[in-house]
Amino acid sequence: MAEAGTLHDAFIDELRDAYDAEKQLTKALSQLAKAASNPKLREAFTTHLEETQGQVRRLEQVFDTLDERARGKRCDGIAGIIEEGKAIMEEELDDAAMDASLIAAGQRAEHYEMAAYGTLVAWANAMGHTEAAKLLQQTLDEEKAADKKLSDLAEGGINQSAADAAGGEQEDDEEEAEDEEEQPRSASPSGGRKASSAGKGSSSARTGRR
Ligand code: FE
Ligand code: ZN
Ligand code: FE
């Protein structure tokens, strides 16, 4: 019977996952930069692309401090997030709506990375890998800063520009609102104003949909 793996084995595995994720992201970030219309957003993606290349090298240093060979292991999580980003880029959206959507895609990646590096720093500290913990913390700080930068751009004008561009679509919105009225009010428990219209026995099935 194979010996059970330790936290150290899990740590190395997560490092390999992160190493692969960063490499996938270098490609994705250049695509996000190309798709962005707002020059500041384009610059933010480009800057983080350069940072990400540094993060790849920093992970190689981390492997080095642990006497491990730098090796990647397919990160399915970031692959999925990148897939979603690609789907957004294929949408036909006005420039501002596209920029807002690219930010949404980018922030999903940053949050995934923040979760990964948060764990890696904590595990490195728990096992006394001080040098590795210090390096990983630097990357965690960069991911947090990249996320904040995207929030600042979104809330500092891009979302509002997109919302303003959507201003002429009032009629569509009203039609959609009417469609939504037909859905059950899932947030309210029985006694909600739509509850009486639900047929006998169908209420739980309908509210169970979400
Ligand atoms: Fe990164
Ligand atoms: Zn992963
Ligand atoms: Fe990142």
Image: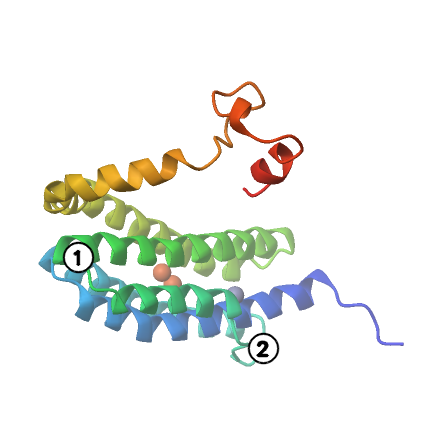
Label 1 element class: helix
Image x and y of residue 39, in percent:
9, 59
197 relative position to 50: left or right: right
Image x and y of residue 43, in percent:
15, 61
Image x and y of residue 68, in percent:
58, 77
Label 2 element class: loop
Q: Residue at x 51, y 62 (%)?
A: 132
Q: CA distance from mark 2 to mark 1?
A: 37 Å
208 relative position to 19: left or right: right
Taking depth in this image into account, of 202 and 177 the one nearest to the observer is 202
Please, is residue 144 above or below residue 203 in the view?
A: below
Q: Is residue 16 visible?
A: yes
Count the marks: 2
Among the 4 quarters of the image, the one containing residue 156: top left
Please, is residue 15 above or below residue 176 in the view?
A: below
Please, is residue 55 above or below residue 119 in the view?
A: below
> Tag 1 or tag 2, which sits nearer the N-term?
1
Local crowd at mark 1 within 10 Å, few (<14), some, or many (≥20)?
A: many
Local crowd at mark 2 within 10 Å, few (<14), some, or many (≥20)?
A: few
Label 1 amino acid? Answer: Leu
Please, is residue 75 above or below residue 191 in the view?
A: below
Q: Do callouts 2 and 1 mark residues in contact (Cβ within 8 Å)?
A: no
Taking depth in this image into account, of 88 and 129 the one nearest to the observer is 88
Foreground mark, 2 or 1?
1
164 relative position to 133: left or right: left
Q: Residue at x 21, y 46 (%)?
A: 154
Label 2 amino acid? Answer: Glu
The residue tagged 2 is: 68
Q: Residue at x 54, y 57 (%)?
A: 120
The residue tagged 1 is: 41
Image x and y of residue 179, in percent:
35, 40
